Image: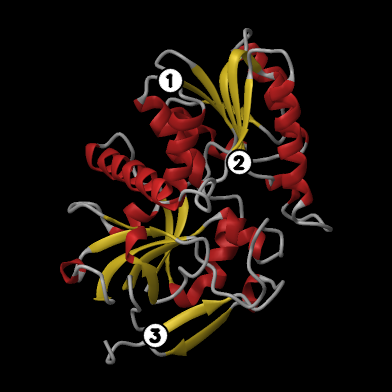
Amino acid sequence: MSTEAFVEVVLPGKVEPEGLEVRHGAVPTAGPGQVVIRMEATGVSFAEQQMRRGRYYDQPAFPFVPGYDLVGTVIATGEGVEPDLTGTRVAALLKVGGWASHVLVDAADVVPVPDGVGAAEAETVVLNGITAWQMLHRKARVRAGQTVLVHGANGGVGTVLVQLAHAAGVKVIGTASVRHHDALRERGVVPVDYRTGDVAARVRELAPGGVDAVFDHVGGRSVTDSWRLLAPGGTLVSYGSASTRDAEGSKQWPVLKLLGRVWVWNALPNRRRAYFYNVWAGRALAKNRFRTRLHADLTQLFAALRSGDVTAEVAARLPLVRAADAMRLAESGTITGKVVLTP
């Protein structure tokens, strides 16, 4: 291990992408219950875009190493960890720390990646896939024949969500800018232009009785429109506040407002439901249950990759030291899928 070079990308504060710092050092050593993973793929998610602006709800204090998830190979194990884990390709959900050549992770938090699934492909369904799977199947509990609305259907979460919905026999209406409409149609999505059209009016034309579920990462006024578009018995799953990415002021307030709206809507005498989805929900109170659920869901996602129910959407692959370029590309609004960083 001592012969390997270590590199990490540090977010020093509220900076433009060019302000990210590349640092070198020593490969970490696994402590009790830990493994050292040699990173093979990590990603640029919307969370990192918020973090560099200081806008992610519970991000750590600057400076820190971003990187919400990763896929790589275990190269060392600590005391109490099965040594046979060494040499295994695994995935892990981290929140921060993934933008590094080598990462320390609790062994209980890694999920094996099956043979035949590449590192970059697997990476596209760790954070994005878990989010999509759990919103679709654990929150909305969709059924074949239903119709759902996916905001940002060309994004990292959206592309996985669309495919999982179709695999479940669900019709999808998806919002995106016009440049992505042809690609969405090829995936069987009915596209709606969120930039120039009246999204709510167009969705009502397509689904006069309302949709069975809406997946909304936009927040703000959009989430209110999403609630109103639900059919009786429908489910709204809000999972972000993208509309406030560049706003000033408290980073907690947009999320607290969403939580307040969800509480009020669920208190109303109606047949609709609303959730604010957080991938980490329940971990603090029931860590083992959280890990078991994550392992089960990610295993299902890797199986969907192998079967072809989900096709990995890798928008671009860039080396870790070009994290600034990767961030710019991810924020450009011109891509479909996820930007992946490799060693």
Q: Position of residue 43 (x, y in %)?
A: 46, 60
| Residue identified by numbered label 1 | 170
| Residue identified by numbered label 2 | 239
Instruction: Place residue 33 in its image quadrant.
Output: bottom left
For the residues labelled 2 and 1, the Cα–Cα distance comes to 20 Å
| Mark closer to the chain start, 1 or 3 | 3
Q: Residue at x 35, y 27 (%)?
A: 167
Instruction: Kindly tell me whether residue 183 is visible in this rendering.
Output: no
Q: Position of residue 304 (x, y in %)?
A: 29, 38
For label 2, the SS is loop
**Front residue (pair 89, 270):** 270
Query: Which residue is most to the right?
Result: 249
Q: Residues within 10 Å of mark 2 (few under 14, many from 20)?
A: many
Q: Position of residue 29 (x, y in %)?
A: 35, 83
- Is the Cβ of the residue at disc 2 closer than 8 Å to that at disc 1? no
Q: Residue at x 57, y 64 (%)?
A: 327
Q: Residue at x 25, y 41 (%)?
A: 303
**Front residue (pair 343, 109):** 109
Q: Position of residue 10 (x, y in %)?
A: 56, 78
Q: Amino acid at mark 2?
A: Tyr
Compared to 185, does 58 lie above or below?
A: below
| Residue identified by numbered label 3 | 6
Instruction: Place residue 232 in its image quadrant.
Output: top right
- Is the Cβ of the residue at disc 2 closer than 8 Å to that at disc 3? no
Instruction: Kindly tell me whether residue 145 is visible in this rendering.
Output: yes
Answer with left or right where residue 233 lies relative to residue 288.
right
Q: Amino acid at mark 3?
A: Phe
Answer with left or right where residue 11 lies relative to residue 55.
left
Q: Residue at x 69, y 24 (%)?
A: 266
